[in-house]
């Protein structure tokens, strides 16, 4: 125990004593402070959504008035969900977010299905949408008489994804520095929109004469409007993916949530009010780049700043999405639910380079289409399904483990209301959009046979094991990467990765009993 404490002290003195830093070993470092946490949440949330979703929310809701109601409710629902995640994140302070919570509550199969869906759909689709939005706004000023070519949009999106993957491979501090800078830039861009809109509406109120005219009464249409609104708030749970890299997570995680979510909700409402005040419903629905159309209408010779600001905004969002989502798959690989190569850390930079490169390749495949609204509806359904399951895990632990140490404990009504609302968001589209929902469910269910054949089944032919081992060695050599050493900052009872097998960890490393022992350990917070 004294040896563990000694290494833990060396970890806390990182940056002051280089020799002791080397003794800490090869592992993820706690380099993220409160401002970094706020920047990650704001940087990911304020991405492409606020510059894409106003069209989707208005299209499905039918009127500016109802659209603003949807925006406000989307922000409130995201805040409730974030507060529930604050309890989960401080109760189970492990990176991986939804994956860690579903694993602890419901076991390995549901956790793997989430991980599989996130790898195939949720994370790559989200990053691809943001990169496509970046491309649209950058290219829009060069094609004033027509729309930018589809091939040019996708090619530029691919370039930005590769560039930011390289930044994240280089260093955690470099990635967070990029995130901090562009988070400030994107908030400034929205402030320009808000101020210009408020000045304009002081003398022009004609767009608000009948704000609710044309509102839809269809529950399915309202749900789809919520999908577009919630997509703009997507990312409120991403800080939970990097809990192990956050300094004092019990304090900084809830603080970052409490500061960022209300701020983003107010900014979104004012930005949409500005959009609707300046642009008519017809103009807004006809635009593929709402902020550019807004700037052209209102800013005159300074209209060029809008594409620039939006490009900065989406640039930062792609960076934050790549940073956070790669940690999800890294944690899944540590527990044996992803190939072992995704749990390798580069020796020089201490970043999960193999995991980042894998995610980059899958995201590039998502660029086979540039239809953003289809990607939004598809990804939102799958993500809502598993977010509902994560919050259900909170209720499960309240029932089964009422005495667990909870640094933050929300009112029991919050998770109940959240589950009811999200349940409606998941179920109603089954009737109104059966094709997209059916395809999403097929993606989720297709992970079950993969789990049974490659994760649960340990009796594989020797030639398969040798092939996997050889491929792991090849990846280690190419990326100069090794498996993460046991982290002395984690409790001794926490599940550990068994790297003695040919490419996956043993099933023992992810037992629910071990995870429950971890979250109920009395020494957990001391070790953290």
Image (spheres, helix red, strand yellow):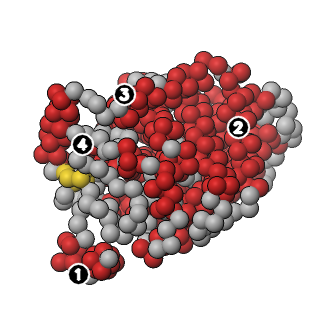
Secondary structure, mark 2, is helix
Residue beneath disc 3:
453
For marks 1 and 3 on the same chain, the one whose residue lies earlier in the sequence:
1
Q: Nearer the viewer, mark 1 or mark 4?
A: 4
Secondary structure, mark 4, is loop
Residue beneath disc 1:
17
Q: Quadrant of the C terminus?
A: bottom left
Tell me the tag on residue 501. Answer: 4
Percent x, y of residue 494? 41, 60
Q: In 3D space, how far apart are the residues under numbered discs 3 and 4 (Cα atoms)?
A: 16 Å
Tell me the tag on residue 423. Answer: 2
Image marks 2 and 1: residues in contact by CB distance under 8 Å = no
For marks 2 and 1 on the same chain, the one whose residue lies earlier in the sequence:
1
For marks 2 and 3 on the same chain, the one whose residue lies earlier in the sequence:
2
Q: Nearer the viewer, mark 2 or mark 1?
A: 2
Secondary structure, mark 3, is helix
């Amino acid at each position: 125990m004294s040896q563990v404490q000694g290494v833990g002290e060396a970890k806390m003195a990182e940056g002051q004593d280089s020799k002791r830093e080397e003794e800490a070993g090869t592992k993820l470092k706690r380099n993220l402070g409160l401002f970094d946490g706020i920047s990650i949440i704001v940087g990911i949330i304020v991405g492409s959504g606020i510059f894409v979703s106003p069209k989707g929310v208005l299209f499905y809701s039918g009127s500016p008035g109802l659209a603003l109601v949807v925006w406000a409710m989307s922000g409130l629902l995201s805040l409730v969900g974030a507060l529930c995640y604050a309890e989960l994140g401080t109760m189970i302070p492990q990176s991986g977010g939804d994956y860690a919570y579903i694993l602890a509550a419901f076991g390995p199969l549901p956790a793997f299905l989430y991980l599989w869906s996130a790898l195939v759909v949720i994370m790559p689709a989200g990053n691809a949408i943001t990169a496509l939005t970046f491309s649209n706004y950058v290219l829009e000023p060069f094609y004033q008489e027509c729309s930018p070519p589809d091939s040019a949009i996708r090619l530029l999106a691919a370039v930005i994804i590769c560039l930011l993957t390289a930044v994240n491979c280089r260093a955690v501090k470099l990635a967070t520095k990029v995130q901090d800078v562009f988070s400030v830039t994107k908030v400034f861009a929205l402030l320009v929109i808000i101020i210009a809109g408020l000045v304009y509406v002081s003398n022009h109120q004609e767009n608000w004469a009948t704000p609710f005219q044309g509102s839809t009464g269809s529950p399915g249409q309202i749900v789809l409007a919520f999908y577009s609104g919630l997509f703009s708030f997507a990312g409120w749970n991403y800080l939970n993916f990097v809990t192990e890299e956050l300094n004092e997570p019990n304090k900084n995680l809830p603080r970052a949530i409490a500061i960022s979510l209300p701020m983003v909700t107010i900014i979104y409402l004012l930005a949409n009010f500005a959009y609707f005040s300046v642009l008519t419903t017809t103009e807004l629905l006809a635009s593929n780049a709402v902020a550019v159309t807004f700037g052209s209408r209102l800013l005159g010779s300074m209209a060029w700043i809008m594409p620039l600001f939006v490009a900065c905004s989406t640039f930062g969002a792609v960076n934050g999405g790549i940073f956070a989502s790669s940690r999800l798959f890294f944690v899944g690989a540590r527990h044996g639910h992803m190939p072992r190569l995704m749990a390798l850390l580069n020796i020089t930079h201490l970043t999960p380079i193999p995991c980042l490169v894998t995610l980059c390749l899958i995201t590039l495949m998502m660029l086979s289409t540039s239809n953003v609204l289809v990607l939004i509806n598809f990804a939102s359904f799958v993500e809502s399904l598993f977010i509902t399951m994560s919050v259900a895990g909170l209720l499960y632990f309240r029932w089964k483990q009422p005495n667990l140490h909870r640094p933050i404990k929300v009112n029991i009504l919050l998770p109940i209301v959240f589950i009811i609302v999200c349940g409606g968001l998941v179920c109603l589209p089954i009737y109104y959009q059966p094709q997209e929902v059916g395809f999403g469910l097929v993606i989720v269910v297709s992970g079950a046979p993969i789990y049974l054949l490659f994760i649960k089944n340990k009796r594989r032919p020797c030639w398969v094991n040798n092939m996997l081992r050889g491929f792991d060695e090849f990846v280690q050599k190419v990326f100069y990467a090794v498996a993460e050493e046991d982290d002395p900052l984690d409790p001794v009872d926490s599940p550990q990765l068994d790297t003695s097998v040919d490419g996956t960890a043993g099933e023992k490393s992810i037992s629910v009993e071990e995870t429950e022992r971890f979250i109920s350990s009395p020494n957990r917070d001391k070790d953290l």
